[in-house]
Amino acid sequence: MTLLAIWSKITPYLTTKNLTRGAILIAIVVGIFFLGWMLRPPQPPIITKLPGNNTVVRLPGIDKLTVKLIYKYVPVEDKAAIEAVMAENAKLKAEVQQLTLTVASSSSTNTGTITVEPNPTVPTKPTYTFDDWRLKFWSDGDRATYTLAQKFIIVNSVGKNKDNVPVNIVSLFEIDAQGARVPVPTTSTLTVAVGPPGRHWYVKPGIQVGIGYLPAPITSPAYDSTPTQFAWSGVVAVPWLKRGVTTATEDTRYAFLTPTVTANAQEATVGVLPVSVNLGNLKHVPLTNLWASPYIGFAPTAGKYRAGFAVTATF
């Protein structure tokens, strides 16, 4: 059967009344989904304690960090530093996905020789100078000044553990007079990160091909009428309205109101997959692209509605 013949069978049913009913039904379904999305409750933060006094705060459903979000989890004393870092990102037009705040503590001792020199201003009070590789100290007995000069190197690794929790390891080293890297102990690390991302609605047309188990007419002289039996049919679908973590197929859980065409040796049908579920998005399923759906359609040649089941894959 050609597409033109199928279209000629469908045309009589495309009345204004039927089209209006279909449009109202689609509007109601989309409206319900949109209302549910608008009224969704905020997801609480996920706080994970890791070894080494390392704390990770994840904000589900958040696409980017803002100063207001970060302020809820950092000490008041660090807010000015946070503002400065976020301002630098804003200049670069960068969206911040993670922010790490690490506290380090270090103390060191050294000995050396004090240099005593005459004080040209007060001859009876000499000056005392101590010059270390990081510290320059001066005193006249009544007051003192010093200059502290240090160089550091920061090594930061960003990863995820088996539970998909961000793990940021920050190591701080001081560079001494000989260029050696001296470890500076860190006392705590706080990471504020977006995610895990929440599921959201999006529109992305695609093509799905598979098989369906649908009723098909039996053509036989032994029958006075044309009864039906279930038979396998080829399925071609065009999913467009989806819900998932990202727009990638493996991260998409559902597709809705998918226009579909089926065909077998007996007849062709046009219809819709009301809800499709990506089985590959479920746990313990090795595939990432396998969709299962109920099917509702219409067979123009028989003038009857058909209902069945379809399994498809995205191409």
Image: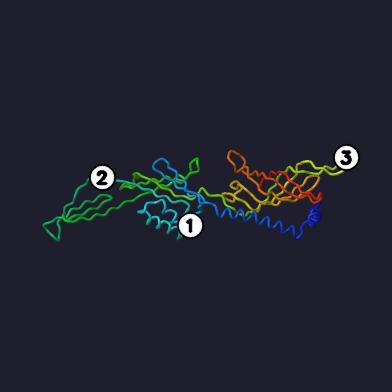
Q: x and y percent of residue 213 in the render?
A: 73, 42
Mark 3 or mark 1: whose residue is earlier in sequence: 1
| Nearer to us: label 2 or label 1 | 1
Q: In the drawing, does residue 293 fall left or right of residue 97?
A: right
Mark 2 or mark 1: whose residue is earlier in sequence: 1
* Disc 2 from disc 3: Cα separation: 105 Å
* Disc 2 from disc 1: Cα separation: 42 Å
> How many circles with numbers are drawn on the protein?
3
Residue in the foreground of this view, choosing between 232 and 87: 232
Give the vertical position of 25 relative to 183 (above or below).
below
Mark 2 or mark 3: whose residue is earlier in sequence: 2
Q: In the drawing, does residue 170 fall left or right of residue 209?
A: left
Which residue is painted at 46% across and 50% down in the image? 193
Label 2 sits on a secondary structure element that is: loop
Q: x and y percent of residue 187 in the render?
A: 35, 44
Label 3: how many residues lie within 10 Å, few (<14), some (14-19) or many (20+)? Answer: few
Label 1 sits on a secondary structure element that is: loop
Q: Residue 222 got which mark?
A: 3
Residue that lies at the very extreme toward the left in this rendered image:
124
Q: In the drawing, does residue 163 fall left or right of residue 128?
A: right
Q: Residue 94 got which mark?
A: 1
Q: Residue 254 got which mark?
A: none
Q: x and y percent of residue 118 in the render?
A: 14, 56
